[in-house]
Amino acid sequence: MNPHGLRFWNTQKQVCNICERRPWFWLPRGHQNPVIAEKGIIGAGKRYVDCLFCGSSDRDRLVFEAFKQNESHFLKGNLLHIAPEKPLWRRWFSQGWNRIGVDARAEGYRWSYGADILFGDLRYLDFSDGYFHAIVANHVLEHIEQVELALQQIYRMLKTGGIACLQVPFSSILEESIEADPSWDKKQREAIFGQWDHVRLYGKNFLKEWELLGFESVNINLTPEVRLLYRMHPTEPVIILRKK
């Protein structure tokens, strides 16, 4: 449960760090599902967190603030944004990144995306080795089958020293990740993972598995005061990996 996101009205004078405005109230996001509490899933659940003005979510603001506060640690240059969230996508340009957006649904979602978002599957992108200084996939990997192919691509496309921000929902209770069986229908995935379009629920061991691919975790801390001010989850970690 995210106690920062329980109130509809903005009674705590919280602000959006992306558009820098103070909404009168926060719009709803997420799904109410018993398994989210049962399995202690971080990064999921029904909450009031979307900015009235720019539409940013608590997830967007978390990633943006992590980048903003740690600019000196990043090699700023080419940034690949997978399934780009509009509020974040707009701000990358103003932050000095050379942004490239890709989504496997871009052709069908052209009404939502502009022509600057490319159609492509993260598992099979053909950008050259070491092309990107940063890659952002914010709550994307839990939707991808054969996710090991996507992780290999991320590693290949990053420069040495480049960073990948790979936010995923994960269970704070389960040690091992759970993969969907191909026979499961939408109702079974929703009951087990908390959302019908997820194909896995990550357990607490997922970062150790990713580090075996050649990444190292980057320790990024945002204070409780910052998380409260910008209406972020109080404990959701910022998952940033650097290519060794």
Image (cartoon, rainbow, N blue to C red):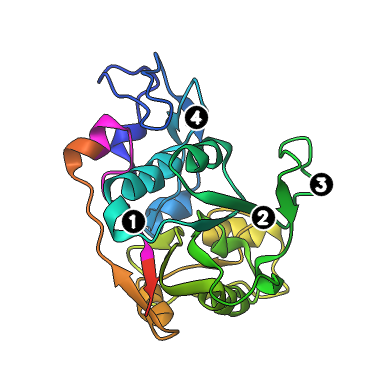
Give the x, y percent position of residue 112: 72, 36
Q: CA distance from mark 4 to mark 2?
A: 26 Å
Label 4 vs label 1, nearer the camera: 1
Residue highlighted by disc 3:
108
What is the span of residues highlighted in magenta in the rendered image? Answer: 227-240
Q: Secondary structure at mark 4?
A: strand
The N terminus lies in which quarter of the figure? Answer: top left
Q: Label 1: which residue?
A: 238
The answer to whether residue 188 is left or right of residue 154 is right
Residue 97: percent from left, percent from top? 49, 49
Q: Closer to the N terminus: mark 3 or mark 4?
A: 4
Tag 2 and tag 1, C-beta contact below 8 Å:
no
* Lower position in the chain sequence, tag 2 or tag 1: 2
Marks 1 and 3, the one that precedes in the sequence: 3
* Residue drawn at the location 48% of the way across and 57% of the way down: 77
Is residue 48 found inside the magenta-colored segment of the image? no
Tell me if mark 1 has few (under 14), some (14-19) or many (20+) residues whose alpha carbon lies within 10 angstroms of its own. many
The residue indicated by pointer 4 is: 28
Say which label, 2 or 3, has the lower sequence index: 2
Earlier residue among tags 4 and 1 = 4
- Distance from the alpha carbon under mark 4 to that under mark 1: 22 Å
Which numbered disc covers residue 102? 2
Circle 2 packing at 10 Å, graded few (<14), some (14-19), many (20+), is some
